[in-house]
């Protein structure tokens, strides 16, 4: 007897429906075909133990399981449940006509209990797209799948519950989640606030500009000056996620298995990988391509602390994603694209000892060491960072000042207002939402400057030896500063402020 059940395979951030055909016929043996990995081949032992534990029998005849389409590789133990139900139906131990109405996924333990799986959100989206009535999956994944409306999410705790549901002995109410309500009432999870930072007004201003235009920032200064503290507070002034952004971000974290509590992500991600990270862990990849840190930071912030300590190859692989805002992982048989629209915030010391240019402490680095240290960060990468900010140590008077610093709640409305101006400006462009995302041709059209501004910029370019890319970056930052000021035109003071944020381009910065 031939039985068909339906599962799903995740590639990149998209899912593909898998038809699982089970035939029980004369002969002996258990065979799984259709490009399964070892975890699927080992499912025989788990399924056999679970069936026996629950009072069912594994057919002692020949069992063939075909997973179609055969050219898509299937990985993981999440196919245990659909294979087990297919075997029971094919051996006439499960009597139902409803198997074809549902996508079924779940990893089984030896007693038939179900364990949570990864990538549930794209699986649910694909199931709805293909017209399935619902999806059957472990209870821990129900809230995540319920984000997708017009789909019955049937949460089961064990194989037995799934069998009882199909045979009509158990009524399971589909899990429902009001995503709009959940999204609107989600609490801002950022406990860090700009009010905690005393002094550093110029750095706060630079981060406000970065948040308003989606610009990349590098902070350079001695240890203890507050670089990490400031970077960790940046998400608290970013605009809240839109519903579309929340779904995109949740999808990536679902595929990576990083959704701790399930449900919809409501806060912008903040990723801070250690400097020992590998190329693959940063940009994504592996034998079964998974999203890397840059994709997990999609619609949020990627913070690279102590930038020169990262391996050169790791930093260089970021160059293309920084420009294109996506990363393509190419393999011999497939090519997968992960979104990577993130804000890069980097920090570094000016030299190995950390005290070059320090107002009080003396640098002990030898001749040429400072320049060698700065050269660890390549020119092409620095070119892609819009704002270069020097962080100076906070004085004792600033630290003990009683006047309360401006809070994140006071800064964020200004950022929101500037972002709304940009949303209106780019409303006809699906892929552009902020000034930092403008392509070169649009920069020419939307960042017009006066004759006096042109002269100022020409002088700055000649003195600092700026590249054509740096020229574009200055104009984008000036456009953001003008938006924050509520100005339709880029004034000369906006341009002057944007130019001063290119400190690492200055010739002889390190003496």
Image: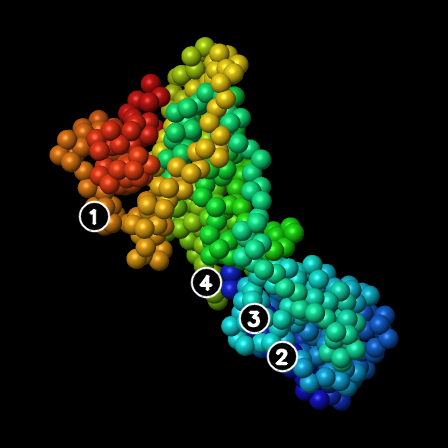
The residue to which callout 3 is attached is: 150
Q: Image quadrant for the N terminus?
A: bottom right
The residue to which callout 2 is attached is: 101
Q: Horizontal and vertical percent for residue 182?
A: 58, 54
Q: Residue at x 45, y 10 (%)?
A: 360
Circles 3 and 1 in contact, beta carbons < 8 Å: no
Say if residue 507 shows up in the picture.
yes
Sequence-first disc among 3 and 1: 3
Sequence-first disc among 3 and 2: 2
How far is the residue under mark 4 from the one under mark 3? 31 Å
How far is the residue under mark 3 from the one under mark 2? 14 Å
How far is the residue under mark 3 from the one under mark 1? 44 Å
Mark seen at residue 335: 4
Q: Image quadrant for the C terminus?
A: top left
Q: Horizontal and vertical percent for residue 354?
A: 48, 20
Are there few (<14), some (14-19), or many (20+) residues within 10 Å of tag 1? few
Sequence-first disc among 2 and 1: 2
């Amino acid at each position: 007897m031939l039985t068909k059940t339906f599962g799903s395979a995740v590639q990149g951030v998209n899912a593909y429906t898998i038809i699982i055909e089970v035939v029980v016929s004369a002969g002996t043996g258990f065979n799984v075909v259709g490009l399964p990995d070892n975890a699927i081949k080992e499912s025989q032992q788990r399924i056999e133990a679970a069936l026996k534990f629950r009072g069912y029998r594994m057919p002692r005849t020949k069992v063939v399981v075909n997973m179609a389409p055969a050219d898509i590789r299937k990985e993981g133990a999440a196919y245990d449940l659909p294979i087990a139900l297919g075997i029971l139906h094919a051996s006439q131990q499960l009597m139902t006509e409803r198997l074809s109405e549902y996508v079924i996924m779940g990893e089984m333990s030896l007693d038939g209990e179900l364990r949570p799986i990864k990538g549930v959100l794209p699986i649910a989206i694909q199931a709805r797209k293909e017209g399935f009535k619902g999806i059957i999956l472990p209870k821990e994944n129900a809230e995540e799948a319920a984000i997708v409306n017009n789909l019955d999410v049937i949460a089961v705790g064990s194989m037995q519950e799934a069998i009882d549901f199909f045979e009509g002995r158990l009524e399971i109410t589909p899990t429902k989640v009001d995503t709009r309500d959940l999204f609107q009432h989600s609490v801002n999870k950022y406990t860090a606030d700009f009010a905690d930072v005393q002094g550093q007004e110029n750095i706060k201003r630079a981060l406000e500009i970065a948040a308003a235009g989606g610009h990349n920032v590098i902070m350079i200064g001695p240890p203890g000056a507050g670089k990490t503290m400031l970077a960790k507070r940046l998400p608290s002034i970013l605009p809240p996620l839109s519903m579309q952004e929340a779904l995109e971000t949740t999808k990536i974290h679902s595929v990576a298995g990083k959704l701790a509590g399930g449900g919809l992500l409501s806060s912008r991600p903040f990723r801070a990988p250690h400097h020992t990270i590998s190329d693959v862990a940063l940009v994504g990849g592996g034998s079964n391509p998974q999203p890397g840190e840059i994709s997990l930071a999609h619609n949020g912030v990627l913070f690279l602390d102590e930038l020169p300590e990262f391996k050169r190859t790791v930093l260089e692989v970021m160059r293309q994603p920084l420009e294109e805002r996506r990363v393509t992982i190419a393999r011999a048989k497939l090519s997968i694209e992960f979104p990577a629209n993130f804000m890069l915030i980097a920090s570094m010391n000016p030299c190995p000892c950390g005290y070059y240019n320090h107002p009080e402490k003396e640098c002990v680095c030898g001749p040429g060491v400072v320049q060698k240290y700065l050269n660890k960060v390549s020119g092409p990468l620095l070119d892609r960072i819009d704002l270069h900010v020097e962080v100076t140590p906070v004085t004792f008077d600033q630290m003990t000042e009683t006047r309360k610093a401006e809070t994140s709640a006071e800064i964020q409305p200004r950022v929101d207002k500037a972002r709304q101006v940009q949303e209106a400006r780019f409303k006809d462009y699906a892929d552009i939402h902020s000034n930092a995302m403008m392509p070169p041709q649009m920069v020419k059209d939307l960042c017009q400057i006066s004759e006096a501004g042109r002269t100022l910029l020409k002088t700055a370019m000649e003195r600092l030896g700026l590249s054509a890319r740096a020229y574009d970056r200055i104009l984008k930052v000036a456009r953001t500063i003008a938006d924050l000021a509520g100005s339709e035109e880029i004034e000369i003071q906006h341009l002057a402020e944007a130019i001063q944020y290119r400190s690492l381009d200055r010739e002889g910065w390190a003496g």
